[in-house]
Amino acid sequence: MSDYSPPLTILVVDDDPVFALLVQACLERAGHAVQVVNDGGKAIERLTGRGFDLAMIDLSMPRVDGFRLIALIRHTPRLAKLPIMVVSSRTDQKGIEEVQRLGANGFASKPVDWATLPATVETVMRTCWSGAGSASGHGKTGHFDRRPHASACQS
């Protein structure tokens, strides 16, 4: 993808099947195409096999957790520029700083505000494709000033 233009093709990576289906339904209602996998290993396989516009990743998963998945994406040349949005119940400052350092583009905490999730995705994508940073992820949602990885979203 060379620039941001909805609708998006989104891969949701979350081991909670109910949550993943709710995210899928919410984003599909907003017009996006959504696929779901339940762990990071399956996510890497799916991401390398098809073009996605955004990966939406939970942090706490078996086998390959979200932190490791973000690192793998950023170190895979074909995927390195893929926008990443973390959606997690883990909201401690250390975890948020770590996903920033690894190269995530945005963060939303669980429980998710379903009414605003599509707008949050749009904001993360617009911020990513404009190259603009924003305040670090404090509170329910946040977009990251990704200084070390600023080019990750640009072609």
Image (spheres, rainbow, N blue to C red):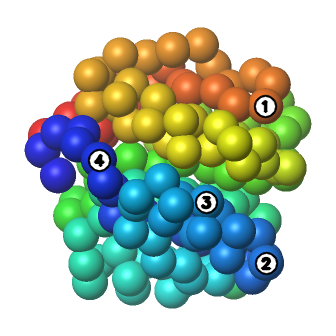
Q: CA distance from mark 2 to mark 3?
A: 12 Å
Q: Nearer the viewer, mark 3 or mark 1?
A: 3
Q: Label 4, secondary structure: give it.
A: loop
- Residue 111 at what x, y percent from top left? 85, 50
**93 lies above or below 31:** above
Left or right position of 15 against 152: right
The residue singled out by tag 2 in the image is 18
Sequence-wise, which precedes: disc 3 or disc 1?
3
| Res. 147 visible in picture | no
The residue singled out by tag 3 in the image is 26
Q: CA distance from mark 2 to mark 4?
A: 25 Å
- Residue 2 at what x, y percent from top left? 12, 44
Q: Label 1, secondary structure: give it.
A: loop
**115 lies above or below 130:** below
Q: CA distance from mark 4 to mark 3?
A: 15 Å
The residue singled out by tag 4 in the image is 6
Q: Label 3, secondary structure: give it.
A: helix
**86 lies above or below 91:** below
Residue at 24% x, 39% y: name it: 4
Residue at 46% x, 59% y: name it: 55
Sequence-wise, which precedes: disc 4 or disc 3?
4
The residue singled out by tag 1 in the image is 140
Whether pointer 2 and pointer 3 mark residues with C-beta atoms closer than 8 Å, the reply is: no
Q: Nearer the viewer, mark 2 or mark 3?
A: 3
| Kind of residue at disc 2 | Val
Number of numbered discs visible in the structure rendering: 4
- Residue 108 at what x, y percent from top left? 69, 40
| Kind of residue at disc 4 | Pro
